[in-house]
Image (cartoon, rainbow, N blue to C red):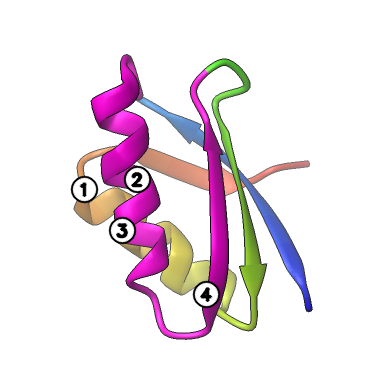
Amino acid sequence: MDATTLKVTGMTCNHCVMAVTKALKSVPGVESADVSLAKAQAVVKGSADTQSLIAAVKEEGYEAALAS
C-alpha cells in the first residue's frame, strides 16, 4: 500500500482536522488518512493519486501540497 504525505495549511482546530480527514477518506482509493494539526500534515495510505487528494483538501477550504 502506497503512502502519500501532504503538507496541509489553514487548519486551526480539531474541527479542521476532522473536515480534512473526511475529505481525504472520500477520495476513491484511500484506505486511511491520518491528519495531524500539530505537524500540519496528512499521511494518506492507498492508491489514490496525489492531485485528487490535494483537490479534495482544497475543496474543503484548506491548502495542500506534496510534502518534500
| Neighbours of disc 3 within 10 Å: few (<14), some (14-19), many (20+) | some
Residue shown at 57% from the left, 15% from the top: 38
Q: Is residue 22 above or below residue 19?
A: below
The reply, left or right, for residue 62 in relation to residue 37 is left
Magenta highlight on residue 12 = yes
Residue 56: image location, x then y, percent: 32, 61
- The crowd level at tag 2 (other Cα within 10 Å; few <14, some 14-19, many 20+) is many
Do the numbered discs 3 and 2 sit on residues whose CB atoms are within 8 Å? yes
Mark 4 lies on a secondary structure that is strand
Q: How far apart, in angstroms, are the residues tagged by discs 1 and 4?
A: 17 Å
Mark 3 to mark 4: distance in Å?
10 Å
In percent of the image, x 58 and y 35: which residue is there? Answer: 41
Residue under label 3, please give it. Answer: 23
Circle 4 packing at 10 Å, graded few (<14), some (14-19), many (20+), is: some
Q: In this view, does 54 lie above or below 26?
A: above
Give the residue at mark 4: 30
Which residue occupies 70% across, 43% down?
A: 67
Tag 2 residue: 20
What kind of residue is marked 1?
Glu
Dots 1, 2 in contact, CB < 8 A: yes
Instruction: Give the residue at mark 1.
Output: 60
Q: Provide the residue span drawn in magenta.
A: 11-37
Q: What element carries label 3?
A: helix
